[in-house]
């Protein structure tokens, strides 16, 4: 058995030893949980650039290689060979389902797709021009008012029900938000359809005629769900974990994750990317905007390029580019203006020394907005689709945390730089 490696920290001449922990992949970490007690000091790491907040079995990213693994499986293989529901099962259970488990899981999800009729009335409390993300934050949070009695989430069977409910109901909740803000009648789920086709039916179907989802488009949407299902300890996942560490209701924790995801620096990036392409407008102007992006005095930012974790090509971006091409070909939109513009922008950026030096490769947001627009999904719904998919990862991460023997409520420290201790002056003497 190998000897435990340690790291030594010397402060004011006094050395302290801290164990070094090794994971399956990635950087080793220095276990500093005893740092405060041993040294009277804390670490400072704004934005958690070098801090591991937990141990996890679920997702691993190698940013230098451009690699994303769900439970050890490369995202490329999962997107090609598995459905989103198989991936959701994998994220939670650690293994892909066998044939019988797959059928049982899919049937269970189908049996939970309806929402309480009283919940549908919540939508009438929102303005018709409300952003759909605001609507689903409220509605998902409200699920905690419907499913709270006699629930003990220390029991695996209760966590089973919670997972099934929210994975099944998110497509219904998201589609109802779309129907509400557009003034369309609500469409209820159909249990004879697969997950993605059912969502498209609830989004785009009408009561007065039959709707059949295009299988190529439904498969593309299913792949989009898979690509967004989890992504290590990102801002929204960390939010779900932090909220859940207090013992909060899991539906409220997911609502907190949705709120965080709404930010333009996180889940809203694909919407911002599409808006950027619309601003550029034409292939002839790409060079102008590339130069603006390199000009430090210009506030313009090239959206859809670069990633805090990936220092190589985002593997999801490669897959999304292929999905984009397949969808546009199916719809006869190969010469779509925005798609051609995106291809030109990508080509120039990948050949430009500035972008190569700074490793600003296209990320998953670069093409996902174009794909969703081609599917008929409006821009304001892009982040809702992201939230729908990411819920699988959020719940897997939440369950991993609350079942961890080392689980504690999250309580970050701070470097206080405010006023020193002082006394309140006598009244009238200030």
Image: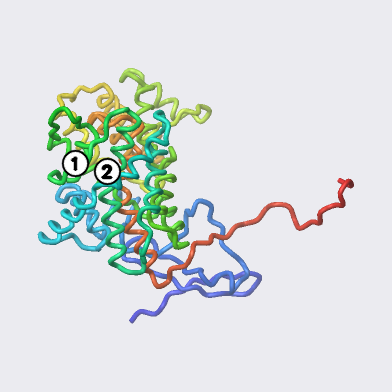
**Residue 242 x/y as whole percent:** 46, 57
Depth order, front residue of 34/2:
34
Q: Residue furthest bottom?
A: 1
**Residue 323 x/y as whole percent:** 20, 37
Residue hosting label 1: 198
Q: Residue furthest front?
A: 118
Labels 1 & 2 near each other (Cβ < 8 A): yes
**Residue 183 x/y as whole percent:** 32, 27
**Apparent side of residue 232 relative to residue 210 in the rendered image (left or right):** right
> CA gap, disc 1 to disc 2?
8 Å
Kindly identify the residue that appears in the image at 21 percent across and 49 percent down.
84
Kindly identify the residue that appears in the image at 39 percent across and 64 percent down.
401
Kindly indicate the quadrant of the structure image that contains residue 154. Answer: bottom left
Image quarter of the C terminus? top right
Q: Residues within 10 Å of mark 2 (few under 14, many from 20)?
A: many
**Residue 260 x/y as whole percent:** 44, 46
Residue hosting label 2: 171
**Apparent side of residue 28 relative to residue 112 in the rendered image (left or right):** right
Mark number for residue 386? none
Kindly indicate the quadrant of the structure image that contains residue 278. Answer: top left
Label 1's element? Answer: helix
């Amino acid at each position: 058995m190998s000897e435990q490696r340690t790291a030594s920290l010397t402060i004011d001449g006094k050395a302290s030893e801290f164990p070094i922990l090794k994971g399956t992949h990635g950087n080793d970490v220095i276990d500093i949980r005893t740092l405060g007690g041993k040294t009277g000091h804390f670490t400072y790491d704004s934005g958690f650039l070098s801090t591991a907040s937990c141990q996890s079995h679920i997702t691993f990213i190698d940013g230098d290689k451009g690699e994303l693994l769900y439970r050890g499986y490369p995202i490329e293989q999962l997107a090609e060979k598995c459905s989103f529901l198989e991936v959701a099962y994998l994220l939670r259970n650690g293994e892909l389902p066998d044939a019988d488990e797959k059928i049982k899981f899919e049937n269970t999800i189908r049996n939970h797709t309806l929402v309480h009729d009283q919940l549908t009335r919540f939508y009438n409390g929102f303005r018709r021009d409300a952003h759909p993300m605001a609507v689903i934050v409220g509605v998902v949070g409200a699920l905690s008012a419907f499913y709270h009695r006699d629930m003990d989430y220390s029991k695996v069977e209760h966590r089973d029900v919670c997972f099934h409910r929210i994975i099944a109901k998110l497509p219904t909740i998201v589609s109802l938000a779309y129907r509400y803000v557009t003034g369309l009648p609500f469409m209820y789920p159909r249990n004879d359809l697969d997950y993605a086709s059912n969502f498209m039916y609830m989004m785009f179907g009408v009561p007065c005629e039959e709707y059949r989802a295009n299988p190529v488009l439904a498969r593309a949407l299913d792949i989009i769900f898979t690509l967004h299902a989890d992504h290590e300890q990102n801002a929204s996942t960390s939010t779900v974990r932090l909220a859940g560490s207090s013992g909060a209701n899991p539906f409220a924790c997911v609502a907190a994750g949705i709120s965080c995801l709404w930010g333009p620096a996180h889940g809203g990036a694909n919407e911002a990317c599409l808006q950027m392409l619309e601003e550029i407008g034409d292939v002839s102007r790409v060079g102008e905007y590339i130069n603006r992006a390199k000009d430090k005095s210009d506030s313009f930012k090239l959206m859809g390029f670069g990633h805090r974790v990936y220092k190589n090509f985002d593997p999801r971006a490669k897959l999304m580019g292929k999905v984009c091409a397949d969808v546009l070909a199916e719809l006869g939109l190969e010469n779509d203006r925005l798609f051609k513009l995106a291809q030109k922008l990508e080509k120039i950026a990948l050949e430009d020394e500035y972008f190569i030096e700074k490793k600003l490769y296209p990320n998953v947001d670069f093409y996902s907005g174009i794909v969703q627009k081609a599917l008929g999904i409006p821009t304001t719904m892009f982040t809702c689709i992201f939230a729908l998919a990411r819920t699988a990862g959020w719940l897997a991460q939440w369950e991993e945390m609350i079942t961890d023997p080392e689980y504690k409520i999250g309580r970050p420290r701070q470097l206080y730089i405010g006023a020193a201790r002082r006394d309140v002056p006598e009244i009238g003497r200030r």
